[in-house]
Amino acid sequence: MQTQGTVAPGYEPVAEAFTRAFDGRPTMGAALAVLVGGETVVNLWGGVADERTGSLWEQDTATVIFSCTKGLVSILAARLVQEGRLHYDAPVHRYWPEFATAGKENVTVGELLAHRAGLSAPRIPFTTEQILDWDYVTSRLALQDPLWEPGTGYAYHAITHGWLAGEVIRRVASEPIGDYFGRATARWTGDAWIGLPTSESHRVAHVQVGESQVQAGRALADMPDKWTLQAMTLGDALPPELVGDASGFNDPRVRAAQIPGAGGVATALALASIWSATVIETEGARILDDATLERALMPMSEGAPVYHATGPWPRWGAGFQLDSAARSYLSPRSFGHDGAGGQVAFADPDSGTGFAFLTNWMEAGDDRATQIIDALRTVHRD
């Protein structure tokens, strides 16, 4: 596979690992961006953006980033903490009074971000039409009885996390989360969105589902609890794989809605730049300071979750996914968030790195991004 873009001297092994990611995947499209010290050292793209038409992945092609969106939401929450407008230790109901029902009165903002609120799935299924309505979804979640006693354990809030954290952010920022995201990351607004503008829909890659992703979706139905599957599908709203040919996050209506648990859309360069700006000045701006990061990255959820899952397990701070055996980043101090099907985005404060690998070829448990990160680690070590 021939890729396009630029690679700084010394980073050729990273480019080679990116090229190998296309092996055996003739209709895959992908992009990779790496910034170090606030400067772009790798900006590559290649492959097929839409296998239905054969259109190629271009420099400005964007794609759905799935749960990498949670990382962006966590950046926004941390930004409000930095400004003194939000507090991780405060109860959620301080900002969202309607949330203080059904035993959720003591849930803190930090616990909400760390998947400890007991609301990983809706008790009553949502439909696709319902998840397009922000107020409907958030009001339902605010009134719901938790699935377990909040704060006593965690389970991944695969989709609901975005509405829960997003409503807190909306109440504090006094504007929809997609609008606040646009202001907080204004330098990259034209290439990253929570809620895709219709005018940009032509740039978005069509997502394909590989067989491993299909099998992973089927495995959810065999889990001993129903909530793990319902956390992903919301009942009737999304397919287990998150996309179908014209459903899930391939549905333009879903991409246009602000669904910050999984619905962000971005180019790799914009996403890597945003993460770079959390740890070092990038394009004249830094989004978070060191003191804010120190608090936001304190481990809050790790080990075995409430519902059975085979280890190794991930770790979270205040919404940020931390380095772990389940998701190995560049160093033990790296933080970010991965996403369904192979997406990975993170920052590393030790090396001043921002990283994003995005693809429209969804695979479960694959090591495409891991091999690229391993190559980058070798480059930095050498």
Image (cartoon, rainbow, N blue to C red):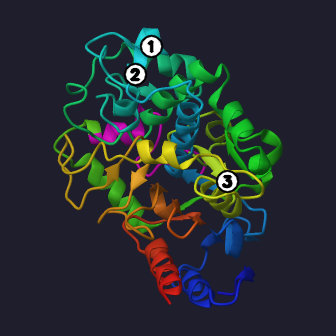
Circle 2 — which element?
loop
Circle 1 — which element?
helix
The overriding secondary structure of the stretch rendered in magenta is loop
Q: Nearer the viewer, residue 319 or 176?
A: 319
Circle 3 — which element?
strand
* Residue that mark 1 sits on: 94
Q: Is residue 229 left or right of residue 165?
A: left
Distance from label 2 to label 3 (Cα)?
32 Å
The reply to whether dot 3 and dot 1 touch (C-beta < 8 Å) is no
Res. 193 visible in picture:
yes
**Residue 372: image location, x then y, percent:** 51, 78
The residue lying at 64 percent from left, 33 percent from top is 257
The reply to whether dot 2 and dot 3 touch (C-beta < 8 Å) is no
Distance from label 3 to label 1 (Cα)?
32 Å
Among numbered discs 3 and 1, the one appearing first in the sequence:
1
The quadrant of the picture occupied by the N terminus is bottom right
Q: Amino acid at mark 2?
A: Ala
The residue lying at 48 percent from left, 72 percent from top is 369
**Residue 26: image location, x then y, percent:** 59, 80
Q: Residues within 10 Å of mark 1 (few under 14, many from 20)?
A: some
Nearest to the eye among marks 2 and 3: give it: 2
The residue lying at 54 percent from left, 79 percent from top is 25
Distance from label 1 to label 2 (Cα)?
7 Å
Q: Amino acid at mark 1?
A: Arg
Magenta residues, as a range? 228-248
The quadrant where residue 4 appears? bottom right
Q: Is residue 129 left or right of residue 144?
A: right
The reply to whether dot 1 and dot 2 touch (C-beta < 8 Å) is yes
Q: Is residue 147 above or below residue 224?
A: above
Q: Amino acid at mark 3?
A: Ala
* Residue that mark 3 sits on: 266
